[in-house]
C-alpha cells in the first residue's frame, strides 16, 4: 500500500517535471519490446527485441498530439546498433521537424544468429514478419502517441530491409499505407544448385562463423526460406542435396515462394491498395538488375510507383537519403491527422 | 421411403455425365424436410476487371439447418465448402448431397449453415487463386463471400464460427486460402486435394498447352483444361491476349523457369514452410484421400511436410476413388469433426 502511494507520487512528480524538460531536438532511445512471434525459434533469436524509437521535437510538451509513424527495417550483416551508428536516423526526424513535419520513426532489431532474419517467417529463424507487422506495431501504438491507423503508417527499409518492406506490404496490406524500398535485395528467386547445396551441407560451425558477406548470405536466406526442424545439419535448413549429389527441387521451390518478383501476381490486390510505392537504388549497386526486373513486373501489371536512380553504390548514400528522400516521401503520403475518432 | 430416395439419388450422382462444355453435372440434391436452401447471388468486388470476362455475380448455395426458421435469435457456425474442377457450385452441392449432410448432422445435434460458392470460370475453375486474368478468387472467398454471408444470415461472425472445406481443386483452395487468410477461418479440411506439388511441364506438354486455340478450350479435354486453368491462375500476363497468360514454354521453344517458379510459389507443398504461423493458428486441420485416387501420393507429401514441422492434423487414407466417398465423408467425418472444433453457438 505504501509502495503504491509512493509509486503514484512518483508518477505525479514525473508528470509535473516533464514540461520543464523541453524536448527541443529529435530524441532517439534504444528500448526493448517483447515479440511472441519469435518465441520458440530454433536459432535462439531473442524474443526480447531491441528497437530504436525517435520522437520529434516537442513530443514531451504537447501531451495530446498524435503522430504518424515510419517503420524502418535495416539491412543484413550488421547489428542494429551498428546500423544506427552508420545511418543516424534521428537526423531525418529532426530535419523533417525543421521543415514543419513531425513524425515518429522506429527501427527494430532484425539481426539473427546468422546476421539477418530477412523479415520472413519460418521455424528456424523465427517469425520476423509478424514481429514487425503485429508485435512491434502494437507495442509502438500502445507506448507512444501515434495515430494508430494504416493511413498514418509507413514502411521502409534498406537492402534486406527493402526486401522486408515489399514482403510485409504484400502480406500485411492492412497495416501500412505507403512503402519505400531502398536498394532492396532478394527480389528475384534464388536458385539452389547442387554445388551451393553441397557447399552449405559441408560447412561446420567454424566455417559459418568465419564466412564472408556473400558466402553467409546464402546460408542465412536458406535458413529463413527453407527451414527444416528435422535436418541433420546444425543450420536446421533444407538444401535438397541427395546422396547421389543431385539436388531435390523443393528447396528451390521454397525460395521461389519467398521471392517478391515471383509472389507479385498473387499479391497484386495488396500492392494496388497502397497509397504510394517508392523504389530507389544507386547506379553502381550490384542489386540494380534485380530491382529493374522487379520494376518490369510492376510495369507489366500496371502498378504505379516512384523510382529514382541516383549516383552511388549499395550503402554510401543511405544515411543522407533517409533524410532527404525517404522521410520526405512519407511526409507527403502519410496522414498527419487521424481519419477516425478511434485515432484520436 | 426417404432412404430409398437417397439411394436412388446417389446412383444418379454416380452416373453424372459431362455436358457440352465438359463440365460435370448432377441431378438435383434431395432436400430433406426441415432444410431450407437458398440460391443467392453474391457480387465479387474482388473479381472486377478480370480479363477472362468471368462473371462478377456468383451463385452461392446456402443450406440452413432445421432450427434456423424456428429460433430467430440463434446464431450458427458456417462451413464453407469449395467445389472441384469442371463443376459448378450448384452441381457440386447436388452431387455431394449437401442438404442431407446438414439434416443428418442437425438430427445428431450438430447444426451448421453450409455455404457452397460457384467459382466456375472460362477455363473450368478458378484454382481459388488471385489472378488479373481469372479474378481474385482467393480474396473472393475470404472477403466478399464471408462478408456477404455474415451480413445476410444469423452466423457466428467470428473466426471461431467458420470452417473451410474443399474437394480436389477445392481442397487445393482450402490450403491456399487458409494459409493466406488465416484470420478468417478456425478449422480446415482438404478432401483429395489436387495441385499439392508444383506443376512441371516438358517442352512437349508445354508446347501442346500453348497451342490450344482460345475457342478450342472446351474441347481440349479435362487434363488440358486443368493445365490451362492453372496457367491463367498462376502465371497471368495482362499484356498477352487472348489467354492473358505466360506459357511455360518461351519463344525459343525452351522451358521458361520463371513461369515454373511462379507455379511453384502457388504450390501448397512449397508454401507450408513459410506459413507455419498461419498453420499453427488453426484449431484443427484435416486431410484425407482415397487409396485408389491418383492424388494419394501428393496428399501424402503434404501430410509428411506437416509432420516435419510438427503441425497437428487429422490424416486418413480410406478405401475409395477421387469421387466416390466425398459426399458421405463430408457428412459422416468432416462435419462431425468440425463440430468438435468450431464455436457451435448453443
Image (cartoon, rainbow, N blue to C red):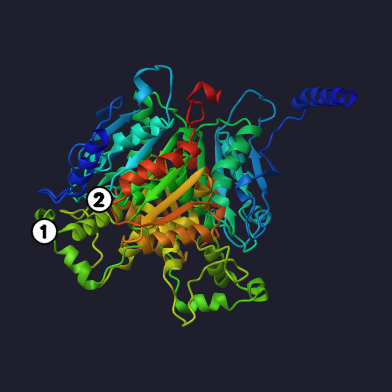
Residue ID at (21%, 69%): B205
Q: Position of residue B167 (x, y in %)?
A: 32, 49
Q: Is residue B22 above or below residue B149?
A: below
| Residue marked by disc 2 | B85
Q: Position of residue A81 (x, y in %)?
A: 68, 54
Q: Position of residue B275 (x, y in %)?
A: 48, 52
Q: Is residue B88 above or below residue A151?
A: below
Q: Is residue A112 above or below residue B75?
A: below
Residue ID at (65%, 42%): A53
Label 1: how many residues lie within 10 Å, few (<14), some (14-19) or many (20+)?
few
Kindly tell me whether residue A272 is visible in this rendering: no
**Callout 2: chain:** B
**Callout 1: chain:** B
Q: Position of residue A266 (x, y in %)?
A: 35, 50
Secondary structure under badge 1?
loop
Q: Quadrant of residue B136?
A: top left
> Where is the N terminus of chain A found, in terms of image quarters?
top right
Residue in front for this viewpoint, B318 or B61: B318
Question: Is label 2 on the same chain as label 1?
Answer: yes
| Residue marked by disc 1 | B213
* Label 2 to label 1: alpha-carbon separation: 20 Å
Label 2: how many residues lie within 10 Å, few (<14), some (14-19) or many (20+)?
many
Amino acid at each position: 500500500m505504501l509502495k503504491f502511494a509512493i509509486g503514484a507520487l512518483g508518477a505525479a512528480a514525473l508528470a509535473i517535471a516533464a514540461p520543464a524538460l523541453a524536448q527541443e531536438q529529435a530524441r532517439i532511445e534504444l528500448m526493448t519490446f517483447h515479440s511472441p512471434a519469435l518465441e520458440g525459434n530454433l536459432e535462439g533469436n531473442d524474443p526480447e527485441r531491441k528497437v530504436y524509437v525517435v520522437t520529434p521535437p516537442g513530443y514531451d510538451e504537447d501531451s495530446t498530439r498524435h503522430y504518424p509513424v515510419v517503420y524502418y527495417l535495416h539491412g543484413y550483416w550488421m547489428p542494429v546498433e551498428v546500423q544506427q551508428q552508420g545511418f543516424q536516423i534521428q537526423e531525418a526526424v529532426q530535419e523533417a521537424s525543421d521543415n514543419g513535419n513531425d513524425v515518429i520513426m522506429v527501427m527494430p532489431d532484425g539481426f539473427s544468429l546468422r546476421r539477418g532474419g530477412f523479415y520472413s517467417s519460418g521455424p528456424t529463424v523465427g517469425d520476423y514478419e509478424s514481429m514487425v507487422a503485429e508485435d512491434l506495431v502494437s507495442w509502438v501504438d500502445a507506448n507512444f502517441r501515434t495515430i494508430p491507423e494504416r493511413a498514418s503508417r509507413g514502411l521502409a527499409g534498406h537492402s534486406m530491409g527493402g526486401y522486408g518492406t515489399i514482403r510485409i506490404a504484400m502480406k500485411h496490406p492492412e497495416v501500412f499505407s505507403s512503402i519505400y524500398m531502398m536498394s532492396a535485395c532478394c527480389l528475384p528467386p534464388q536458385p539452389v544448385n547442387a554445388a551451393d547445396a553441397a557447399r552449405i551441407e559441408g560447412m561446420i560451425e567454424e566455417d559459418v562463423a568465419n564466412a564472408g558477406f556473400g558466402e553467409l548470405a546464402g546460408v542465412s536466406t536458406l535458413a529463413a526460406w527453407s527451414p527444416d526442424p528435422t535436418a541433420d545439419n546444425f543450420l536446421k535448413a533444407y538444401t535438397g542435396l541427395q546422396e547421389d549429389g543431385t539436388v531435390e527441387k523443393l528447396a528451390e521451390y521454397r525460395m521461389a515462394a519467398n521471392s517478391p518478383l515471383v509472389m507479385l501476381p498473387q499479391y497484386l490486390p495488396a500492392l494496388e491498395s497502397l497509397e504510394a510505392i517508392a523504389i530507389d537504388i544507386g547506379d553502381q549497386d550490384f542489386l540494380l538488375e534485380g530491382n529493374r526486373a522487379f520494376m518490369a513486373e510492376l510495369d507489366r501489371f500496371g502498378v504505379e510507383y516512384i523510382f529514382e536512380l541516383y549516383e552511388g553504390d549499395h550503402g554510401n548514400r543511405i544515411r543522407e537519403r533517409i533524410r532527404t528522400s525517404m522521410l520526405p516521401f512519407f511526409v507527403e503520403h502519410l496522414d498527419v491527422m487521424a481519419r477516425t475518432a478511434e485515432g484520436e | 421411403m426417404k432412404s430409398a430416395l437417397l439411394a436412388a439419388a446417389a446412383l444418379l450422382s454416380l452416373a453424372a455425365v459431362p455436358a457440352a462444355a465438359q463440365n460435370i453435372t448432377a441431378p438435383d440434391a434431395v432436400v430433406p424436410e426441415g432444410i431450407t436452401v437458398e440460391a443467392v447471388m453474391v457480387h465479387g468486388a474482388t473479381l472486377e476487371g478480370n480479363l477472362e470476362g468471368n462473371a462478377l455475380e456468383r451463385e452461392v448455395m446456402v443450406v440452413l439447418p432445421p432450427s434456423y426458421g424456428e429460433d430467430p435469435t440463434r446464431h450458427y457456425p458456417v462451413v464453407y465448402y469449395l467445389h472441384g474442377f469442371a463443376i459448378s457450385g450448384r452441381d457440386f452441392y447436388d452431387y455431394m448431397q449437401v442438404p442431407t449432410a446438414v439434416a443428418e448432422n442437425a438430427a445428431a445435434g450438430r447444426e451448421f449453415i453450409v455455404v457452397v460458392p460457384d467459382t466456375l470460370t472460362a477455363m473450368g475453375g478458378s484454382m481459388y487463386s488471385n489472378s488479373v486474368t481469372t479474378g481474385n478468387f482467393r480474396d473472393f472467398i475470404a472477403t466478399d463471400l464471408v462478408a456477404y454471408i455474415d451480413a445476410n444470415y444469423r452466423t457466428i461472425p467470428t473466426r471461431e464460427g467458420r470452417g473451410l472445406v474443399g474437394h480436389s481443386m477445392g481442397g487445393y483452395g482450402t490450403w491456399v486460402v487458409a494459409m493466406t487468410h488465416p484470420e478468417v477461418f478456425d478449422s480446415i479440411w482438404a478432401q483429395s486435394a489436387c495441385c499439392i506439388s508444383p506443376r512441371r511441364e516438358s517442352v512437349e506438354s508445354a508446347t501442346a498447352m500453348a497451342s490450344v486455340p482460345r475457342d478450342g478450350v472446351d474441347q481440349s479435354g479435362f487434363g488440358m483444361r486443368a493445365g490451362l486453368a492453372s496457367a491463367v491462375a498462376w502465371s497471368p500476363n495482362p499484356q498477352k491476349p487472348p489467354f492473358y497468360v505466360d506459357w511455360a514454354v518461351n519463344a525459343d521453344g525452351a522451358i521458361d523457369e520463371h513461369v515454373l517458379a511462379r507455379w511453384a510459389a502457388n504450390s501448397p507443398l512449397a508454401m507450408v514452410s513459410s506459413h507455419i504461423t498461419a498453420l499453427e493458428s488453426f484449431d484443427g486441420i484435416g486431410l484425407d484421400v482415397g487409396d485408389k485416387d491418383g492424388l494419394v501420393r501428393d496428399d501424402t507429401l503434404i501430410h509428411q511436410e506437416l509432420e516435419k514441422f510438427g503441425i497437428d492434423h487429422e490424416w486418413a487414407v480410406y478405401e475409395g476413388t477421387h469421387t466416390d466417398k466425398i459426399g458421405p465423408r463430408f457428412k459422416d467425418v468432416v462435419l462431425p469433426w468440425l463440430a468438435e472444433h468450431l464455436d457451435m453457438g448453443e
